[in-house]
Image (cartoon, rainbow, N blue to C red):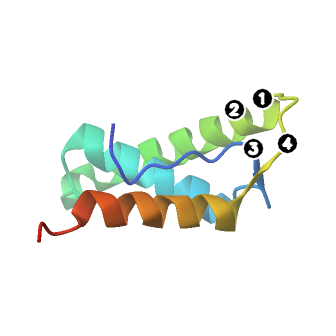
């Protein structure tokens, strides 16, 4: 799966519509192979992004959990630490 698509569920504060749209755009880009579609494909591309964003919004709204919400800053710090280890240069 695309590394740029991140978990959006069970965070405090909840995912914004912009975050959902960005994830939808990344998904459509990955599936279609287009970073920016041609004019001939632009309407289909935009419609797909809208449909996936809507489906994602409905999904996130209908999921239930008993787990405590994750803290965005804590998760971001953990991701930075993983990136440091992954991309560290060998001595």
**Are the residues flagged by discs 2 and 1 in contact, CB closer than 8 Å?**
yes
Residue 3's spot in the image, x, y percent?
35, 49
Q: CA distance from mark 4 to mark 1?
A: 14 Å
Q: Which residue is mark 4?
A: 68
Residue 37's spot in the image, x, y percent?
22, 57
Please state, as top left, top right, bottom left or bottom right, where the C terminus lies in the image. bottom left
Q: Which residue is mark 3?
A: 10
Q: Which label's residue is closer to the chain start, 3 or 4?
A: 3
Give the residue at the far left of this rendering. 91
Question: Residue at point 27% right, 57% down?
Answer: 86
Whether residue 46 sits left or right of residue 35 in the image: it is right
Comparing labels 1 and 3, the label whose residue is closer to the camera? 3
Q: Which label's residue is closer to the chain start, 3 or 2?
A: 3
Helix, strand or loop under label 1: loop
Residue 26's spot in the image, x, y percent?
38, 52
Q: CA distance from mark 4 to mark 2?
A: 18 Å
Residue in front for this viewpoint, 30 or 54:
30
**Are the residues flagged by discs 1 and 3 in contact, CB closer than 8 Å?**
yes
Q: Which residue is mark 2?
A: 59
Residue in front for this viewpoint, 2 or 58:
2
Question: Residue at point 59% right, 53% down?
Answer: 20
């Amino acid at each position: 799966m695309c590394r740029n698509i991140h978990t959006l569920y069970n965070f405090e504060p909840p995912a914004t519509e912009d975050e959902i749209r960005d994830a939808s755009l990344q998904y459509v880009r990955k599936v279609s192979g287009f970073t920016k579609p041609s004019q001939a494909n632009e309407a289909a591309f935009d419609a797909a992004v809208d449909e996936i964003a809507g489906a994602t919004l409905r999904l996130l709204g209908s999921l239930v959990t008993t787990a405590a919400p994750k803290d965005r800053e804590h998760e971001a710090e953990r991701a930075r630490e993983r990136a440091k280890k992954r991309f560290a240069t060998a001595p």
